[in-house]
């Protein structure tokens, strides 16, 4: 068997076209959604992601507000810049690009963001809403994964899903999202304390690899016909490498690849969160 591709790039383009129409409808009411990004330091990967986000905004008609700060930025200065965006009516949503360099603490910065403007869905209040099943912005990567599966006809209700990685941006919130009544999957979350990861992945109908360890998931760890979603991204001289070994394609029914799978969907869901917030403000 050779797996079919879950084409996140194509689906993200479709979603962006849908958002463009919603943004145009908002413009008729005099409302322009604005996405802010706060980028601290000079990590080339982070710069490339943030550039991509602003390119997406331009395509859809969302205004962009870019805040770039040197790696030497103090906590007090970062706090001031975050509060500025909280108070800026032109900014309907924003993100603080993670991880922050040096001594700046990611969790501390996330808590400073107005939960109503939290385009990442990672503020503790919004993660709490996710736990409680209350409406709020959803974390972009987990939402992108669910959307990528759903729009390709891959059912989640009753499915055994094995998520490898319990990080705060992907694995942990994905577990919360997939176990809501509306998704109804049964989830196993693996991490470095898991005794035998393969024992869990082999049982799964859907494997999500979000560890950031190149080639971690090999063909022998996958049930024939399972769906495999690659999330992990490692930059090498040869380009971006995911957590799925290429051999997985020979046993899986579907594979979401790196690049071209979850990454573009993450960006599309960020835009979706910004547009949804602007619509809520407009009473749409
Ligand atoms: N495609 C996309 O849109 C996105 C991709 N990413 C990528 O996804 C990956 C995960 O991101 P993030 O959650 O932020 O990263 P973290 O570093 O926060 O989390 C990684 C998780 O993987 C677990 N892990 C690491 N090695 C193993 C192993 N050998 N076996 C089992 N579990 C393991 C860790 O376990 P423990 O907790 O025990 O340390 C941890 O829970 C990264 O490569 C990141 O670049 C992230 C966001 C978006
Ligand atoms: N506050 C915050 N929110 C995030 O959502 C966030 C973050 N910090 N820090 C880093 C991770 C990583 N992340 C990606 C986004 C897009 C691609 C993406 O578009 N990837 C393309 C390739 C892009 C390229 O070529 O560099 C793809 O997979 O096809 C990847 C990874 C969001 N993250
Ligand atoms: Mg830090």
Image: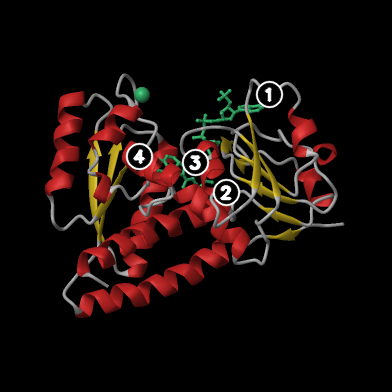
Q: Quadrant of residue 77?
A: top left
Q: Which residue is mark 2?
A: 178
In contact (CB < 8 Å): disc 2 and disc 1: no
Report, in whole angstroms, how far the alpha carbon at label 4 lies from the one at label 2: 25 Å
Colour setting: secondary structure
Upstream in sequence: badge 4 or badge 2: 4
In contact (CB < 8 Å): disc 2 and disc 3: no
Report, in whole angstroms, how far the alpha carbon at label 2 lies from the one at label 3: 9 Å
Report, in whole angstroms, how far the alpha carbon at label 1 lies from the one at label 3: 18 Å
Upstream in sequence: badge 4 or badge 1: 4
Relative to residue 146, is residue 273 drawn left or right? left
Residue 25 x, y percent position in the rendering: 28, 79
- The quadrant in which the C terminus is found is bottom left
Q: Quadrant of residue 171?
A: top right
Q: Local crowd at mark 3 within 10 Å, few (<14), some, or many (≥20)? A: many
The residue positioned 33% from the left and 63% from the top of the image is 276
Upstream in sequence: badge 2 or badge 1: 2
Q: Local crowd at mark 2 within 10 Å, few (<14), some, or many (≥20)? A: many
In contact (CB < 8 Å): disc 4 and disc 3: no
In contact (CB < 8 Å): disc 1 and disc 3: no
Vertical placement of 78 versus 145: above or below?
A: above
Q: Which residue is mark 4?
A: 97
Whether ligand 1 has any atom under 8 Å from the Cβ at mark 1 is answered as yes
Q: Quadrant of residue 114?
A: top left
Residue 168 x, y percent position in the rendering: 46, 34
Upstream in sequence: badge 2 or badge 3: 3
The residue positioned 56% from the left and 55% from the top of the image is 146
Q: Which residue is mark 1?
A: 194
Q: Local crowd at mark 1 within 10 Å, few (<14), some, or many (≥20)? A: few
Upstream in sequence: badge 4 or badge 3: 4
Report, in whole angstroms, how far the alpha carbon at label 4 lies from the one at label 1: 29 Å
């Amino acid at each position: 068997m050779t797996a079919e591709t879950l084409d996140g790039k194509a689906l993200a383009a479709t979603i962006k076209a849908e958002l463009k129409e919603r943004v145009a409808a908002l413009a008729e009411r005099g409302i322009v959604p604005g996405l802010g990004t706060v980028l601290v330091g000079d990590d080339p990967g982070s710069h490339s992601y943030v550039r991509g986000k602003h390119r997406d905004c331009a395509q859809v008609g969302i205004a962009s507000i870019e805040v770039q700060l040197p790696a030497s930025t103090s906590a007090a200065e970062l706090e001031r810049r975050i509060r500025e965006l909280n108070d800026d009516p032109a900014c309907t949503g924003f993100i603080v690009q993670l991880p922050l360099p040096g001594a700046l603490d990611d969790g501390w910065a996330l808590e400073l963001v107005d939960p109503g403007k939290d385009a990442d869905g990672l503020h503790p209040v919004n993660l709490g809403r996710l736990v409680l099943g209350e409406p709020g912005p959803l974390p972009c990567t987990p939402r992108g994964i669910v959307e990528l599966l759903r729009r390709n006809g891959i059912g989640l209700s009753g499915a055994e899903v094995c998520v490898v990685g319990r990080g705060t941006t992907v694995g942990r919130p994905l577990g919360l999202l997939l176990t809501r009544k509306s998704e109804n999957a049964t989830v196993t979350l693996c991490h470095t304390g898991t005794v035998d990861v393969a024992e869990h992945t082999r049982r799964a109908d859907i494997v999500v690899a979000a560890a950031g360890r190149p080639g971690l998931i090999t063909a022998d760890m996958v049930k024939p016909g399972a769906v495999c979603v690659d999330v992990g991204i490692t930059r090498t001289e040869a380009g971006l490498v995911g957590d799925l070994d290429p051999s997985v394609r020979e046993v899986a029914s579907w594979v979401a690849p790196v690049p071209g799978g979850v990454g573009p969907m993450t960006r599309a869901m960020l835009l979706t969160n910004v547009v949804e917030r602007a619509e809520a403000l407009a009473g749409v």
